[in-house]
Image (tube, rainbow, N blue to C red):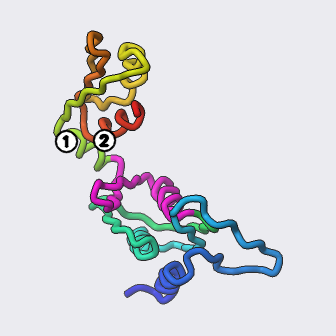
Amino acid sequence: MRSPSRWMVAVALTLAPAVPTSVDAQSVPSPAPQSGTRRVSVTWEAVPLRDVLLALASFSGVSIVSGAGVDGVVTANINDQPWDVALEAILTSLGLFAVEEESGIIRVQSMADLADQETVEPIVTRSYRLSFVRASEIQSAVAPLLSSRGSISILESTNTVIVSDIARVQRTIADLLQ
């Protein structure tokens, strides 16, 4: 059974997401967030990571799924930060990362899980036809982004870069070339 303090943190997070947990007479209200991401102020002391993920999922309205190897204890004091920035900082401190699927679900994994997954993930081949730069010039910028199973080739006659790699790398390269 969870201790009442953990429930109170989750409730305070859900009910008062954009307001600091304590306000003194000299504090100035923070400006409205520039992006659509809601801001959060919360303190956790030795709270299991799974409870933190559930609280952030409830607060944000986003589905968060943790992998099998995802575990840890969170001690954090987050003050008026976008919830997704807070999530990233917490996960990074524990050696974890999050991936948002195309469906909008956020999947939390350990680096070891990612490496295992990428060794069996299918290879996708995609061509990128370039207009304002020579394909041979882009090759040196794209090559370091490839996974250990990836490859790149250039078709100079059409100024096209052809990349064969996993989907994560393809998304990164597509973003770079846009």
Q: In x, y percent, where is residue 98?
A: 38, 55
Q: Would you say the residues marked 1 and 2 are in contact, meaning their CB atoms lie under 8 Å apart?
A: yes
The residue under label 1 is which amino acid type?
Glu
Q: Is residue 86 magenta?
A: yes
Q: Is residue 48 visible?
A: no
- Depicted 79 relative to depicted 93: above or below: below
Q: What's drawn in magenta, residue-wise? A: 82-111
Q: Which mark is residue 121?
A: 1
Q: Residue at x 59, y 74 (%)?
A: 18
The outermost residue toward the top is 157
Identify the residue position indicated by label 2 in the image.
Answer: 168
Q: CA distance from mark 1 to mark 2?
A: 10 Å
Rate crowding at label 1 as few (under 14), some (14 to 19) or many (20 or more) other CA atoms within 10 Å: few
Residue 137 visible in image: yes
State the image coordinates of residue 41 (x, y, percent, origin top left).
Answer: 60, 72
Q: In the current view of this chain or complex, which residue is farthest to the front?
A: 131
Figure quadrant of residue 2 = bottom left
Q: Quadrant of the C terminus?
A: top left
